[in-house]
Amino acid sequence: MPNSRPSGMFGFTIVWLGQIVSLLGTNMTGFGVTIWAYELTGSATALALVGFFFVTPMLLFSPIAGAIVDRHDRKLMMMLSDLASGLATILILVLYLAGKLQIWHLYLTGAIQGTFQTFQWPAYSAAITTMLSKEHYGRANGMMSLAESGSGIFAPLLAGALLGFIGLGGILAIDVITFVIAIGALLTVHVPNPPRTEEGRQGEGSLLREAAYGFHYILARPSLLGLQIVFLLGNFFLGVSFAVQAPMILASTGNNELIFGSVNSVGAIGGVVGGVVMSAWGGPKRRVHGVLAGWALAGLLGTTLMGLGRSLPVWAVASFIGAFLTPVINGSNQAIWQAKVAPDVQGRVFSIRRLIAWFVNPISMLIAGPLADYLLEPAMRSGGWLSGSLGWLVGTGPGRGIALIFVITGLIGAVIGLGGYLFHTVRNAESLLPDYDEASPREGRAKRLEQLLAARRRLVSEPDSLGRQRALKQVQRELRELGRQSGAG
């Protein structure tokens, strides 16, 4: 008997709406806790450590979590992740109401939430693949980015307005209610199980073997590995500045919460606009341009401009641009992976993919706080050892050492994005890799032949280099193999 619960785009939209509500509560809590923690400690290092303890478990458990996601029902994995995050929020609420909440409690609950978030992202990503057809991948990923950014528009404003009336305890209580709504939305829809594929059969075995298969899958495909190296490097450098964005604005404005909230809200508006554009557009025809050019522009016009700014208007523009580009970058990259990776191994592969891109994030967070507090902030104070030479660029005084971090890391991020175009395996990733295709073998071979011929034409027209020769040989080998398969078929 067919399942009568909503699926397809309608079912996905129900899940999406639940996530909008849940993310609104999560972002309100994040804003309120950030203000509480900074007022308590006055330390950029303390805030960076909150992020460190959240991200590190996500990385440590990613390989095992991906294998578990592929073994079990994806909807159940999503629900368990939401439930665990809700319970951690309840723990913070109880401690706060009892007057016993301390900064180390945020490290502990962040670690709990990070551990269970390890299951959520690969489960959601893989669910999109089974619920929707390929032409909707870019739009669906744009909608997910829209949910993240849309909730961020109102969360800082609502949290800032409500803190004076209901306090941090009231904000936390709202967050708990939103988790219940998100789980309820998941209960109403049908998430199909992925079809069995040859890749899935090759990766079967013990839990450890299945976890390791994600590594083997990516390492055997240089184009996928190259895309993730771009994210790894970009996340490292831009992650340093992102970890200390709140202290930079608060220190530069004398702890002006309104300006801090306004910058976040404008950034959220940019993310919403980017998500709407991505949802309607689906991304560039060659999605790799959305990834590489997006990284370059985000580094230059988002991060670097944020550091050069000294007042709300410039910070707002930089925040808008950086957030606008995020759905384009992530949505384009996600659509590439969803089209190229078989659905029944996406949990494992996507978990390792995130591990490759994010394993430097804890390092960024550990570096960011001390770099700001003990090196560049003192150096950019009036009379500091860098104030004379770089004061003209970012100014001097509180927050200006952190601003210098933004300028430097943003320029490096731009170089990383543009540098991806120097490598054939990266810029030609979409044509070098075959799409996962549920069509008949004959239709699949015809589509792959078209992709390979287009890749060969593009490579032949490019200037000669060692990378071009290797890529061309790879295309020629696959064309010969495709010819043998067609003869046998």
Image (cartoon, grey):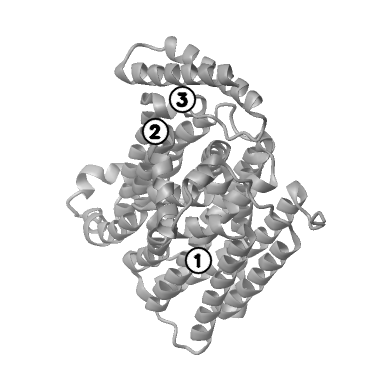
Residue at image location 19% in from the left, 54% down from the top: 384
State the count of labels: 3
| Left or right placement of residue 361 versus residue 286 in this view | left
Under circle 3, the secondary element is loop
Percent x, y of residue 22: 63, 64
Q: Front-most of 354 and 339?
A: 339
Q: Check disc 1: other Cα within 10 Å, few if <14, some if 14-19, many if 20+.
A: many
| Left or right placement of residue 318 versus residue 435 in this view | left
Q: Which residue is mark 1?
A: 116
**Earlier along the polypeptide chain: callout 1 or callout 3?**
1
Asked if residue 413 is positioned above or below residue 126 in the image, the reply reads above
Inspect the image, locate mark 1, and give the three-letter code of the amino acid beneath it: Phe
Q: Check disc 2: other Cα within 10 Å, few if <14, some if 14-19, many if 20+.
A: some
Q: Which residue is mark 3?
A: 428
**Earlier along the polypeptide chain: callout 1 or callout 2?**
1
Where, by quadrant of the figure, is residue 111 drawn? bottom left
Inspect the image, locate mark 3, and give the three-letter code of the amino acid beneath it: Asn
Percent x, y of residue 352: 43, 50
Which quadrant of the figure contains the N terminus? Answer: bottom right
Under circle 1, the secondary element is helix
Which quadrant of the figure contains the C terminus? Answer: top right
Q: Front-most of 108 and 428?
A: 428
Q: On residue 222, which mark appears?
A: 2
Q: How much space separates mark 1 and mark 2, taking CA atoms? A: 30 Å
Q: How much space separates mark 1 and mark 3, taking CA atoms? A: 35 Å
Inspect the image, locate mark 2, and give the three-letter code of the amino acid beneath it: Pro
CB atoms at circles 1 and 2 under 8 Å apart? Answer: no
Percent x, y of residue 349: 47, 47
**Earlier along the polypeptide chain: callout 2 or callout 3?**
2
